Image (cartoon, rainbow, N blue to C red):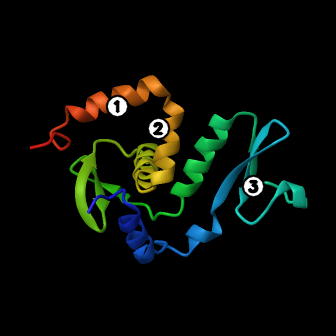
Amino acid sequence: MNAFTPEFLRALRERDEPETSAEGEISLVLRESEGRFALFRSWRKLEAGDEPEAAFETREDALLFLAARGALIWPRRYELSATSEGGRFMVSAEGRPVGWLRTFDSDWLFSVNALAAVLRSSEGLAWLMGLSGPWRIEEVGEIRRDEPLCRQH
């Protein structure tokens, strides 16, 4: 069955449930108003006098913040040990060691957790791809075409 057929998508939606109850709590939508781009909770509107959760001068900034907010619903995948073992800091995922860092770098860990979370969101990933521009999307297609996992056997 093709993953893009209406039948497949309908069956998938019937089984899909939010990973956490927080997903509905932080669901935001982008709305343009008065030359600005605002992020509202899905049930709120500027016309009703509601205050947006955030507002930006450009659509690009609004979409970046929207993708980042959506990433917050996912639990952090990676953890970094606060203590060094043999001069290395252990990186774990789901309670098991998966690697190590030579230095304790909480920014790096935060960044990888954010990226992992965005990859779990089709919308977030689509917004980021769209923001990268047509040339970057074309380049990504070329890179992916040459990857062993993407080649047809």
80 relative to 55, above or below: below
User: What residue lies at 28% left-to-right and 42% top-to-bottom?
Assistant: 102
* Three-letter amino acid code of the residue under disc 3: Glu
Which residue, given by chain and number where applicable, does mark 2 sit on? Answer: 129
- The residue beneath circle 3 is 53
Answer with mark 1 or mark 3, whichever residue precedes in sequence. 3
Residue 54 percent location from the top left of the image: 74, 49
Mark 1–mark 2 CB contact (< 8 Å): yes
1 or 2: tag closer to the N-terminus: 2
Left or right of 59 on screen, residue 96: left
The nearer-to-camera label among 2 and 3 is 2
Which is more foreground, mark 1 or mark 3? 1
Tags 2 and 3 touching, CB below 8 Å: no
Describe the element under mark 2 as helix, strand or loop. helix
Identify the image quadrant of the C terminus. Answer: top left
Badge 1 density bin: few <14, some 14–19, many ≥20, Cα 10 Å: few
Give the farthest residue toward the left.
Answer: 153
Residue 89 horizontal side relative to residue 38, left or right: left
Indicate the amino acid at tag 1: Val
Query: Can you name the residue that lies furthest to the front here?
Result: 6
Callout 1: helix, strand or loop?
A: helix
- Give, as a three-letter code, the residue at label 2: Met
